[in-house]
Image: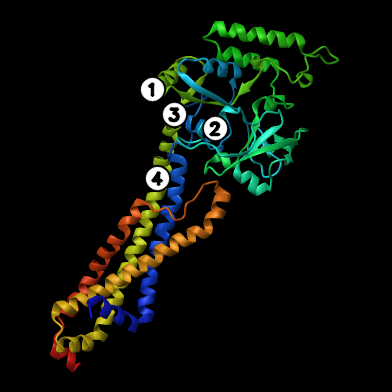
């Protein structure tokens, strides 16, 4: 009979104390696993290349807000860019793809964000090496839409469903008259695209109220192209044509609310532009970013940089705090094992004396006590590991629905690999003193007690 078999039988004789001690370890390990799974999902969502683009171009402002708005749809957009600048980027020799995004509205059901874009958005990968899987057809008509997986699931929409959108966000309550049609549904991506409704960008511009007054557009263009008189002159020509054709009200004042939907490009705006530069020339994205810093009223942001800063600066510290707290909990559980075994030593002196009298050596007795400590820690760790991942499996659908994060409950964090060696080390540490006490037990005194 080996040491662990004897240790296991000994623990079974003290079922209640052993179970409670094991439970302490299991709870600590379960919490540790849950924290690692949750933060692993956050880390995967935010620190991976969440989009397969090199730059996000938007109005000058906070780079983090631009990324959270354009990629994760978690912040309101900073402002808009002239549509003319999109056309300018598309002609730039450094740019392989420039895809526009236009924000501003939400669905009436569920308040999911509306994004106006072009079919090119779905032709590109949503993350490097991962293409969109779409059930349905392309967005061709002005009122055609493609919806994300979570939108379809939560609103019970499918191909052919129709819906309305609210202008300017859920708070405004101003519902557009247009009825939009679902022509395709995205397969799950684990990104913000799952919770987004995509419109044909030309349909987005055709919606009433999506075009600003001529004077406001004119001022924006003058500010944006202040350092580029040639392009400003082209834009102003288009603005003048709009002024001449714009209807007037009874007082003879231009009335932008009765303007026709068809407008020149100078009257259109985009919220952000997703840019892919030439893969064989890595300095293209850098030169484009530097050019915007000193030129137009825009900026180009590498999406990884601000998100990495956010993760490291805030979420990283929160994760470290949780891991430190749970480590203390596991350590306290180890102290509980020490107290449990050490307190049992006085009751087991006669048992140890009998074992010694039957031929068991000091090291044999020493090993049995250490084996008990190791079994308590390892069994508790295994139960906690299974419970942690099991709880993650149960809660993953709800968490995915509420946060939009695609959670793999059985994904194993590399730090979990060192969990059990650490538990064995902890067991050896807390079991050493009780084992030493057993080692020093005097046989004659133990039998006479």
Q: Is residue 116 left or right of residue 407?
A: right
Disc number for residue 316: 4
Dots 2 and 3: beta carbons under 8 Å?
no
Between the residue at mark 2 and the residue at mark 3, the CA separation in whole angstroms equals 12 Å
Mark 3 or mark 4: which is in front? 3
Query: Residue 147: image x %, image y %?
Result: 63, 39
For the question of whether residue 172 can be seen, the reply is no
First in sequence: mark 4 or mark 1?
1
> In this figure, which residue is indicated by the disc labeled 1?
280
Q: Which mark is residue 70?
A: 2
Q: Earlier along the polypeptide chain: callout 3 or callout 4?
A: 3
**The N terminus, quarter of image:** bottom left
Residue 203 occupies quadrant: top right
Left or right of 255 on screen, residue 50 = left
Question: Would you place residue 124 above or below residue 382 in this image?
Answer: above
What residue sits 18% from the left and 92% below the top? 447
Q: Which mark lies nearer to you, 3 or 1?
A: 1
Residue at (47, 25) in percent of width and height: 276
Relative to residue 423, is residue 231 depicted above or below?
above
Q: Nearer the viewer, residue 119 or 203?
A: 119
Residue 373 x %, y %: 27, 72
Identity of the residue drawn at 73% across and 10% down: 243
Q: Secondary structure at mark 4?
A: helix
Label whose residue precedes the other's in the sequence (2 or 4): 2
Give the SS element for disc 2. Answer: helix
Q: Earlier in the sequence, mark 3 or mark 1?
A: 1
Q: Residue 261: x and y, percent?
A: 74, 21
Which dot, 1 or 2, sits closer to the camera? 1
Q: Tell me, for residue 420, which label it has, or none.
A: none
| Residue 254 in the image: above or below residue 207 | above
Q: Earlier in the sequence, mark 2 or mark 3?
A: 2
Residue at the disc numbered 3: 302
């Amino acid at each position: 009979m080996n040491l662990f078999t004897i240790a296991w039988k000994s623990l079974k004789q003290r079922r209640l104390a052993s179970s409670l001690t094991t439970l302490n370890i299991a709870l600590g390990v379960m919490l540790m696993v849950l924290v690692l799974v949750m933060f692993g999902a956050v880390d995967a969502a935010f620190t991976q290349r969440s989009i397969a683009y090199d730059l996000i171009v938007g109005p000058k402002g906070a780079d983090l807000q631009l990324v959270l708005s354009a990629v994760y749809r978690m912040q309101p957009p900073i402002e808009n860019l002239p549509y003319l600048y999109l056309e300018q980027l598309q002609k730039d020799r450094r740019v392989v793809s420039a895809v526009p995004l236009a924000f501003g509205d939400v669905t009436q059901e569920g308040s999911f964000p509306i994004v106006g874009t072009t079919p090119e958005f779905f032709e590109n990968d949503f993350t490097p090496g991962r293409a969109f899987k779409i059930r349905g057809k392309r967005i061709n008509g002005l009122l055609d839409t493609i919806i994300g997986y979570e939108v379809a699931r939560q609103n019970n929409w499918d191909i052919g469903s129709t819906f309305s959108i609210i202008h300017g966000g859920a708070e405004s309550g101003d519902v557009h008259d247009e009825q939009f049609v679902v022509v395709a549904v995205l397969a799950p991506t684990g990104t913000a695209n799952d919770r987004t409704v995509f419109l044909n960008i030309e349909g987005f511009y055709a919606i009433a109220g999506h075009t600003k007054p001529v004077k406001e557009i004119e001022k924006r263009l003058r500010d944006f192209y202040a350092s580029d008189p040639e392009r400003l002159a082209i834009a102003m020509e288009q603005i003048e044509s709009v002024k001449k054709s714009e209807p007037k009200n009874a007082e003879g004042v231009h009335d932008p609310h009765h303007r026709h939907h068809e407008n020149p490009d100078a009257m259109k705006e985009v919220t952000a532009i997703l840019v892919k530069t030439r893969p064989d020339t890595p300095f293209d994205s850098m030169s484009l970013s530097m050019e915007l810093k000193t030129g137009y009223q825009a900026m180009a942001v590498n999406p990884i940089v601000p998100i990495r800063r956010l993760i490291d600066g805030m979420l990283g510290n929160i994760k470290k705090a949780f891991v430190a707290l749970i480590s203390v909990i596991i350590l306290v559980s180890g102290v509980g094992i020490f107290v449990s075994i050490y307190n049992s030593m006085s009751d087991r002196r006669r048992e140890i004396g009998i074992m010694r009298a039957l031929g068991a050596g000091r090291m044999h007795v020493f090993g049995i006590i250490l084996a008990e400590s190791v079994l308590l820690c390892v069994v508790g760790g295994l139960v906690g590991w299974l419970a942690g991942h099991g709880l993650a499996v149960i809660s993953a659908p709800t968490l995915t629905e509420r946060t939009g994060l695609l959670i793999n409950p059985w994904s194993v964090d590399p730090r979990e690999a060192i969990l059990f060696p650490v538990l064995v080390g902890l067991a050896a540490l807390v079991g050493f003193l009780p084992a030493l006490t057993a080692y020093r037990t005097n046989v004659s005194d133990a039998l006479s007690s």
